[in-house]
């Protein structure tokens, strides 16, 4: 039997989420399973449920924007992170940020202000940009059918704590085509580590997040869904990085006494 839009809204409520929350959603539509109305119905459910809040999806383009293909057009450039973000950013009333590699799209309370000004920053997840604003707004971060390896905010936490060897030393010469037709130069640094993609170890803090109550688990459709409080998560990861700045370079488990308070 297929899930309905109302089923999904009941699941959101069952996870303790409120209509006025600020929510960033990492998503895998395939993991949700069969839904009447398919991906559009999932988006309808989220938009209707968070009608008094701010709903955000990542619309990243880091996979395709590079030195050669270097002009980001927020009006037309597809996201490289799944079907839901690509459909969401085309919805009426949705505003998309102008970050050339790590844009987000948002609808609801203060959406235009939330996405504003990303072209000012030369790093993927600046403290003054959309990922830093999740902390300021006390957002919830949802991982719908996704592991915590997709937790882009951790890249931001490393950046905000000045962890070395997380960004390229040089800038790519990227550009932004604004909706009014201007072309803005936006030289940008990229995520980098000599050993490769260290986001594959972001999920090593799962146990710490669950045991401290910073994150909890529910379901959207068939998809296992993590709900994570952005502000205490950032604070926890910052404290762990102070103990070991290379925390995410390998799969060594996080010692429980680092976060248990005992």
Image: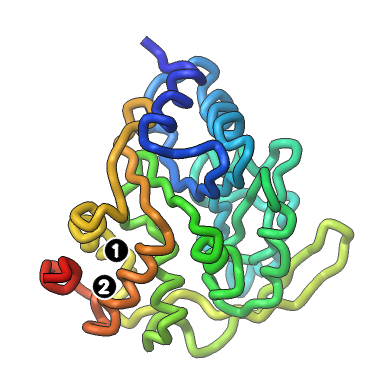
* Residue 172 figure quarter: bottom right
**Between 113 and 175, the one nearer to me in the picture:** 113
The image's colouring method is: rainbow
Residue of label 1:
202
* x 32%, y 71%: residue: 237
| Left or right of residue 119, residue 36 in this image | left
Figure check: 116 above or below 6: below
In the image, residue 197 lies at what x, y percent?
33, 69
Helix, strand or loop at label 1? It is: helix
The reply to whether discs 2 and 1 touch (Cβ–Cβ < 8 Å) is yes
161 relative to 24, above or below: below
- Residue at x 67%, y 69% (from the top left corner): 118
Decide if residue 202 is on the left or right side of residue 166.
left
Under circle 2, the secondary element is helix
Q: Label 1: how many residues lie within 10 Å, few (<14), some (14-19) or many (20+)? A: many
Would you identify the image quadrant in which residue 208 lies?
bottom left
Q: Where is residue 251 in the image (x, y as percent from the top left)?
A: 16, 68
Screen quadrant of the N terminus:
top left
Q: Residue furthest top?
A: 1
Question: Which circle's residue, 2 or 1, is located before the other in the chain?
Answer: 1
Residue 248 marker: 2
Q: Which residue shows up at 60% across the image and 55% down it?
A: 104
Whether residue 180 sits left or right of residue 240 in the image: it is right
């Amino acid at each position: 039997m297929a899930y309905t839009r109302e089923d999904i809204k009941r699941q959101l409520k069952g996870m303790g989420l409120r209509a006025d929350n600020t929510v960033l959603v990492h998503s895998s539509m395939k993991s949700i399973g069969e839904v009447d109305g398919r991906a559009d119905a999932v988006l309808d459910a989220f938009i209707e449920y968070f009608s008094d809040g701010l709903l955000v999806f990542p619309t990243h383009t880091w996979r395709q924007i590079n030195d050669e293909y270097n002009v980001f057009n927020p009006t037309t450039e597809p996201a490289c992170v799944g079907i839901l973000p690509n459909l969401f950013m085309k919805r009426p009333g949705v505003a998309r940020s102008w970050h050339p590699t790590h844009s987000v799209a948002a609808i609801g309370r203060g959406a235009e202000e939330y996405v504003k000004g990303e072209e000012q920053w030369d790093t993927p997840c600046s403290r003054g940009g959309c990922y830093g604003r999740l902390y300021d707004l006390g957002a919830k971060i949802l991982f719908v059918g996704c592991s915590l390896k997709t937790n882009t905010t951790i890249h931001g936490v490393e950046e905000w704590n000045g962890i070395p060897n997380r960004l390229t030393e040089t800038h790519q010469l990227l550009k932004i085509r604004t909706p009014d037709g201007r072309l803005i130069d936006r030289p940008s640094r990229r995520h980098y580590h000599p050993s490769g993609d260290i986001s594959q170890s972001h999920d090593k803090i799962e146990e710490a997040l669950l045991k401290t109550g910073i994150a909890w688990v529910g379901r959207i459709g068939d998809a296992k869904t993590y709900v994570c409080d952005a502000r205490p998560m950032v604070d926890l990861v910052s404290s762990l990085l102070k103990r070991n700045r290379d925390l995410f370079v390998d799969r060594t488990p996080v010692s429980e006494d680092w976060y248990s308070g005992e």
